[in-house]
Amino acid sequence: QVQLTESGGGLAQAGGSLRLSCVASGSIYSIVLMGWHRQATGQQRELVASTTATSTKYGDSVAGRFTISRDKNTVHLQMDSLKPEDTAVYYCKVDAIDTGGWHPAAYWGRGTQVTVSS
């Protein structure tokens, strides 16, 4: 099994910055993708950013303001120029092959609240 531990988040003012981190641990053989999704109240979960060995992807609403980076089994999300509409629960997502498997599976963190005040 793969466990994800998220940290960061909290309260920020519009125009400010926050940094999220997520550490993947457990019986990991290989990590294929690391990323972040978010879900605002009453809305569907959406992609924020993801990174693989060959590509990085950002959601349209955060491109140019958020930056994803990865260091081994840790993924960071630097969020700058925050807007009130960035308020949501942010979830770490990792696609990984565990030591007992053959194909990657998706693992989700429990989520961390980000609130941006105007």
Image (spheres, rainbow, N blue to C red):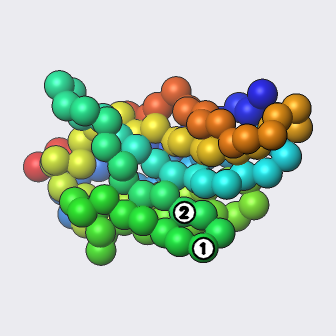
Task: Name the residue at 40% across, 44% down.
Answer: 37
Which residue appears at 61% of the width and 54% of the height?
Answer: 33
- Pointer 1 local density, CA inside 10 Å: few below 14, some 14–19, many at least 20: few
Determine which quarter of the picture holds residue 75. bottom right
Please state, as top left, top right, bottom left or bottom right, where the N terminus lies in the image: top right
**Farthest residue toward the front?**
102
Disc 2 vs disc 1: which is toward the camera? 1
> What's the residue type where badge 1 is placed?
Thr
Q: Quadrant of residue 89?
A: top left
For mark 2, what is the residue? 51
Q: Residues within 10 Å of mark 2 (few under 14, many from 20)?
A: some
Residue 70 position within the rendered picture, expressed as x and y whole percent measured from the top left: 63, 63
Q: Relative to 23, does residue 57 appear above or below in the rendering?
A: below
Left or right, 113 with reference to 6 = left
Query: Relative to residue 11, is residue 98 drawn left or right?
Result: right
Whether residue 100 can be seen here: yes
Residue at 11% from the left image edge and 49% from the top image edge: 118
Asked if residue 67 is positioned above or below residue 36 in the image, the reply reads: below
Left or right: 45 as drawn, with respect to 69: left
Q: Residue at x 61, y 44 (%)?
A: 94
Q: Could you say where residue 92 lies in the image, as x and y percent from the top left? A: 52, 42
Residue labelled with disc 1: 54
